[in-house]
Image (spheres, rainbow, N blue to C red):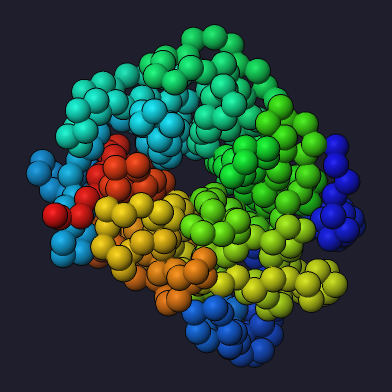
Amino acid sequence: MKKQSTLACCLVLVTLLSGCGKDKQSKEEKEAARQEGPSTVQTAVGPMELPAPYETESVTNRNNTIGWPDGKTPTAPQGFTVTKYAGDLKHPRWIYETPNGDILIAEADRNNSADRITILRDSNKDGKPELQEVFLEKLNQPLGMLVLNGYFYVANTDGVLRYPYKPGQTKITGEGEKILDLPAGGYNNHWTRNLLASADGSKIYISVGSASNVAEHGMDEEKRRANILRINPDGSGEEIYASGLRNPVGMDWAPGSNVLWTAVNERDKLGDDLVPDYLTSVQQGGFYGWPYSYFGSIEDPRLKGQAPELVQKSIMPEVPLGNHTASLGLAFYDKKGFPAKYQNGAFIGQHGSWNRSTFSGYKVVYVPFSNGKPTAKHEDFLTGFIADAEKGDVYGRPVGVTTLSDGSLLVADDEGNTIWRVTANK
């Protein structure tokens, strides 16, 4: 195994020694945190004012998924068309296009998971797959998928498997080789694991979310978690590429650069407007605050004073994405099918959270980029998932987003059990 960076080792040491966080604080502790007042931070897309912790009470606001009526679709901006690409799926969370153009869908959930991958094939390229069948089954909460060097890789919640693969095959039946164990015991709140290859195929990046909100169950649960890991394609050489990322599910490379970006689902129970999810570039050896601080050096009151040296080193994320949006999906648009405004920017699937008095998320947003850097705040792109906010009814919840080689955008709606296709009108 490669030697970890000094910062990563420091994180491991501190977390082992520092005990754990807590989700509940006394009235006196909450009042002391409120008295510290709001904070203003400078992000890459402008200043942002964050309220004091506990300025509003933490609430539970669950959705009720009612499904999509026949003929109804999400809403895209003028100039785009949204169609149903595939249905009859069970919690489709992630999408992967193979080099030969097949579409693979990971169907998984925290409870009653289908634990399978389905293949879709649209041979005549009319936007309506002729083939839809099980590609690989008997998995364990799969998410990330990857074709590399004659293998098909899949990231289960507890490890990375690989299978011999030939382009065009429609089913895998053999036993997979487990090349890496991943932590999945205990509470495993953030169970999804994503995969991304380096441009030259020499490395695989793996996202591993935290086991908890703010380490309230102890740091033994968090070993090798809240990280992006990096390995060789055979599973050897594991290293912590970046740490302090609470739940970094979506990963992608900014077009025209070799910079890794990730969408991060931030912490709960500090109030309606804390803490914003974010999109950030990822520095090798970088520490991004979790669980001790957020948006740079703003300390979480539940862990105040526990790791001042790490708080000081915490990296400020570039783009805030709204509070409690559950920003999980990420795909840069590196194609030419959409108008110039959208080219090279980032699409982000916001699953929607439970921890805000009014719904946020439940949509796909877009962040403009130029020369590999964000140029403005996020804007709505695909909306209409909320049916009745007052009743808590939603039609579905978007998660994974993928740009296809034909220039279209696919969106996985895991509670609507649908894959949506967005195309630009000609």
User: 225 above or below 297?
Assistant: above
Residue 83 visible in rendering: yes
Residue found 44% across the figure and 69% down from its top: 369
Query: Image quarter for residue 78?
Result: bottom left
Quarter of the image with the N terminus is: top right
Camera-nearest residue between 38 and 281: 281
In the image, 28 versus 85, the foreground residue is: 85
User: Which residue of the protein is positioned furthest toward the left in this rendering?
Assistant: 71
The x, y position of residue 62, in whole percent, is 38, 55
Rendered location of residue 18, percent (x, y): 86, 60
With respect to residue 258, does 279 lie above or below? below
User: Seen in the image, is 365 located left or right of residue 14?
Assistant: left
Q: Closest to the observer: 18 or 420?
A: 420
Residue 55 makes an appearance in the image? no
The image position of residue 378, as x and y in percent, is 40, 71
In the rendered image, residue 320, in percent from the top left (x then y), is placed at 50, 72
**Foreground pick, 423 / 34:** 423
Residue, x 72% and y 35% (percent of image)? 232
